[in-house]
Amino acid sequence: MTSADHRSAPAWSHVEEFLRSHEADRIPHPGGTLLAHLTRVAALLADWGTDSAVQAAGLCHAAYGTDGFDGALLGLDERDTLAGLVGERAEALVYLYASCGRAAVYPRLGRDEEPLFHDRFTGADHAPPEEDLRAFLAITAANELDVFAHDAALAARHEPALYRLLRRTRPLLPPAAWQAWQDRQIGQVGQPRPTGTSPSTNGT
């Protein structure tokens, strides 16, 4: 079974229903709808061996919108609602992913020993613990892999820069995530690729 065909675990059915009730199944997204994208991301994270909190965060990673996706399913005043649904750790990871100011943060990843995250909602900077950084990068890798697989134009514009980011942060990625990206690059050998721009606005 491929990741694209992978069904979300039954444990997430209530989360998917919640997302559907917030019209995630009606929002267009590369590969179909936002909900379809979210379930594929969660499936990739499961395939890569991440824990349940990271999978749940991947399933809900667009709940508050992101720096690459303006739409939000929930307001920031509804964080308790999401925490009650997926748990406090998963919700905190959703917030970390959503709040990341990518233009400020991405250049620091893999270069700074303790990279500061810029919270685009509050304007504050903070250094997340390594466990959260690993989860953030796993979700980023899964999200962008799915987006690029379903949108050739976005891949042409942003994939090279995103690949460089993941290559710099490889020690923090799940081994299976890095292998999936390597497999994609191998599959594209011989195809002309542009230099690429900043990977700050790619899908979600």
Image: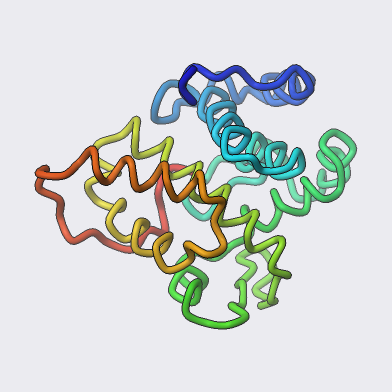
| Quarter of the rendering containing residue 184 | top left
Q: Which residue is depicted at the point 37% across and 57% down? A: 162
Q: Position of residue 95 (x, y in %)?
A: 71, 53
Q: Position of residue 128 (x, y in %)?
A: 70, 70
In this rendering, is residue 180 above or below 40? below
In this rendering, is residue 126 above or below 75? below
Locate residue 185 relative to residue 86 in the image: left or right.
left
Locate residue 128 relative to residue 146 in the image: left or right.
right
In this rendering, is residue 26 above or below 182? above
- Number of labels in the image equals 0
Q: Which residue is depicted at the point 59% across and 62% down? A: 100
Locate residue 170 relative to residue 120 in the image: left or right.
left
Locate residue 166 relative to residue 79 in the image: left or right.
left
Q: Which residue is depicted at the point 43% across and 21% down? A: 32
| Quarter of the rendering containing residue 199 | bottom left
How is the model colour-coded? rainbow
113 or 144: nearer the viewer:
113
Q: Position of residue 5 (x, y in %)?
A: 49, 17
Q: Position of residue 189 (x, y in %)?
A: 16, 44
7 or 21: nearer the viewer:
7
In this rendering, is residue 35 above or below 68? above
26 or 160: nearer the viewer:
160
Q: Which residue is depicted at the point 67% across and 20% down? A: 20
